[in-house]
């Protein structure tokens, strides 16, 4: 059987990756979305096992120590990581697996899965990113400022990726994403 493929989505917090990915997954239910583990507290409406697996720091550190994570990173004061087994199983079965992770994790994946397709989602501008982070109104001012600072550093790394997609308009960004995934030679 043919092996599947790993697809990595990265982009600064507030860029709208979540909305874009949800639309992509609705249109392509054959894609398998990897659910991450995090020590961040759930936001209102977030469900354990659906949006993330929410764990304590000691639990997370235990997973790191036992090699259960494919990659992991600290982001804005919390840990985030990708459970290894489901990803490896899905790829063995020929599925396309989608990771939505920050830049440090994407760099780790480049080492362990050099064939992964890596896509960077860009905001139309830094100002627009700040507006979106503030409109979301789920994070404290301190968290927003940390995320903005991190976003500036992440944007500088956009060139490391195979494709860059500007999320200015959902439909257009989705069309560009689909082209990158399903007919990369065309772009
Ligand atoms: P949020 O707290 O907004 O859900 O996520 C913060 C950042 O962590 C986002 O950039 C998101 O892509 C990233 N992230 C989510 N899951 C993972 C993961 O498993 N590994 C890594 N490295 N980053 C993740």
Image: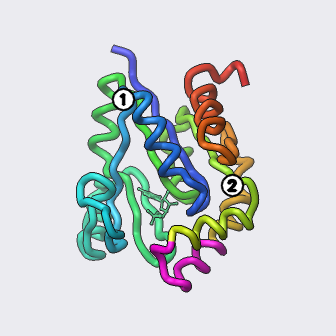
Up the image or down, 44 lies above or below 16; here it is below
Q: Is residue 78 left or right of residue 8?
A: left
In the depicted view, which residue is nearer to us: 18 or 115? 18
- Which residue range is magenta in the image? 137-149
In which quadrant will I find the C terminus?
A: top right
Task: State yes or no: Cβ of the residue under disc 2 lies below 8 Å from any atom of ligand 1.
Answer: no
Badge 2, how many Cα within 10 Å: few under 14, some, many 20+?
many
Residue 181 location (% of width, % of height): 56, 28
Task: Describe the colour scheme in one phrase.
Answer: rainbow
In this view, the residue farthest toward the top is 1
Residue 103 location (% of width, % of height): 58, 57
What residue does disc 1 label?
Answer: 29
Q: Which mark is residue 123?
A: 2
**Residue 169, quarter of the rendered image:** top right
Residue 108 location (% of width, % of height): 52, 52
Residue 32 location (% of width, % of height): 36, 35
- Identify the element where label 2 is drawn: loop
Residue at 66% over, 70% down: 130
In which quadrant will I find the N terminus?
A: top left
In the depicted view, which residue is nearer to us: 34 or 15? 15
Q: Main secondary structure of the magenta part?
A: helix
Residue at 56% over, 22% down: 182
**Residue 28, quarter of the rendered image:** top left
Up the image or down, 130 lies above or below 5; here it is below
Q: CA distance from mark 1 to mark 2?
A: 26 Å
Residue at 36% over, 26% down: 30
């Amino acid at each position: 059987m043919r092996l599947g493929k790993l697809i990595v989505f990265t982009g600064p917090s507030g860029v709208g990756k979540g909305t874009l990915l949800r639309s992509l997954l609705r249109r392509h239910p054959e894609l398998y979305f990897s659910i991450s583990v995090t020590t961040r507290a759930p936001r209102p409406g977030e469900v354990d096992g659906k949006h993330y697996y929410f764990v304590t720091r000691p639990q997370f550190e235990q997973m790191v120590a036992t090699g259960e994570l494919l990659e992991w990173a600290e982001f804005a004061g919390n840990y985030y990581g990708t459970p290894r087994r489901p990803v490896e199983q899905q790829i063995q079965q020929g599925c396309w697996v989608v990771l939505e992770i920050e830049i440090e994790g994407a760099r780790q994946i480049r080492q362990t899965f050099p064939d992964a397709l890596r896509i960077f989602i860009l905001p139309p501008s830094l100002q627009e990113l700040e507006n979106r982070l503030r409109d979301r109104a789920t994070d404290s001012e301190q968290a927003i400022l940390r995320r903005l600072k991190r976003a500036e550093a992440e944007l500088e790394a956009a060139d490391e990726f195979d494709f860059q997609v500007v999320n200015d308009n959902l439909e257009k960004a989705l069309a560009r994403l689909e082209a990158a995934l399903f007919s990369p030679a065309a772009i």
